[in-house]
Image (spheres, rainbow, N blue to C red):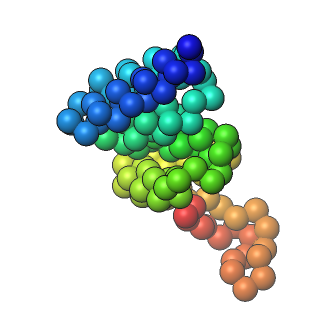
Amino acid sequence: PKRAHALLGAALSFCQRRVGEPEEALVAATVALGDDPGCEPAMLERALALLDAGRPCDAVPALDELYRANRGAEGLGSWMLLAHVRARAAGCAPVGDTGFRVGDRVATTSDLDGFWKQGEWAEII
């Protein structure tokens, strides 16, 4: 029953996004994940609701979670790209678990032949 409830919640989230109610869609997907944290449709719907709600900085880790669960999820690569582009535009795109954000400028710590010398500045892309 919990799996079925989670799938229904994911479907509800999808419908709410389609009618322009991303915050309600986010609630539905979050509740669905409470019933079944591994429900991939609910994971995707939550991430897309975050994007639709104008929260790309929260959508990126949500999509990363789905990526860890199923790298082959249909359309995942496109959604991840869109989320990263929007997060970068918002100035908050994370770069893995490094603590860096896309666009940060950092001093290089060693030479990389043909690219830079130690101490030069590089932009995280």
- Apparent side of residue 91 relative to residue 1 in the rendered image (left or right): left
Who's the residue at 73% across and 85% down the image?
114
Measuring from the top left, give residue 108's x and y in whole percent.
70, 64
| Image quadrant where one finds the C terminus | bottom right
> Total number of numbered labels?
0
Measuring from the top left, give residue 15's x and y in whole percent.
29, 33
Query: Residue farthest to the bottom?
Result: 114
Who's the residue at 61% across and 59% down the image?
106
Q: Is residue 38 above or below residue 124?
A: above
Who's the residue at 76% across and 62% down the image?
109
Quarter of the view holding residue 47: top left
- Apparent side of residue 85 relative to residue 39 in the rendered image (left or right): left
Q: Is residue 59 above or below residue 106?
A: above
Does the rendering let one see residue 55? no
Q: Is residue 113 above or below residue 79?
A: below
Does the rendering let one see residue 57? yes
Measuring from the top left, give residue 84's x and y in whole percent.
47, 54
- Apparent side of residue 11 relative to residue 16 in the rendered image (left or right): right
Query: Residue farthest to the left?
Result: 19
| Image quadrant where one finds the N terminus | top right
Who's the residue at 43% across and 29% down the image?
10
